[in-house]
Image (cartoon, helix red, strand yellow):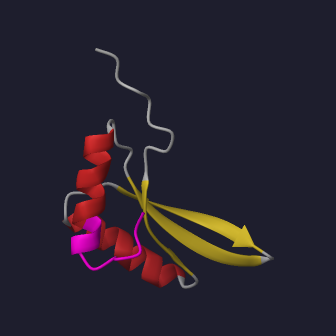
Amino acid sequence: MLIAKIKNPFVQVGIFRNKNNANKTGENMRRMGIKAIIKEQKIKERSYWRVIVGPVNSLEESKVFLKNVISAGFEDAY
């Protein structure tokens, strides 16, 4: 059986203008047992912080992560 490689093995929880909010969100994910990564990104000279979780190894695992993140109150996650 072949398993297709996942194009993007991460789920984005949110993108924040305030670094403290990103850090709090990352900590909430970690308390849920989900590895969270916070990445700074510049858009038009302004810093934003993305909170992503993963990596995941399968589409099924991605769906579970997404469901858990949404149930934690992050309805915009994808």
Q: Position of residue 56 (x, y in %)?
A: 34, 42
Is residue 4 highlighted in magenta?
A: no
Q: Is residue 73 left or right of residue 32?
A: right
Q: Quadrant of the C terminus?
A: bottom left
Main SS, magenta region, reads loop
Q: Is residue 41 above or below residue 54?
A: below
Find residue 53 and report its image quarter.
bottom left
Specify the segment rendered in magenta.
Answer: 69-78
Is residue 71 highlighted in magenta?
A: yes
19 and 11: which is toward the camera:
11
Q: Is residue 9 above or below residue 14?
A: above
Q: Is residue 50 left or right of residue 21?
A: right
The residue most toward the front is 1
Residue drawn at (56%, 72%), measured in percent from left and top?
49
Q: Is residue 49 above or below residue 8?
A: below
Q: Position of residue 8 (x, y in %)?
A: 49, 45
The residue most toward the top is 1
Q: Position of residue 46 (x, y in %)?
A: 73, 79
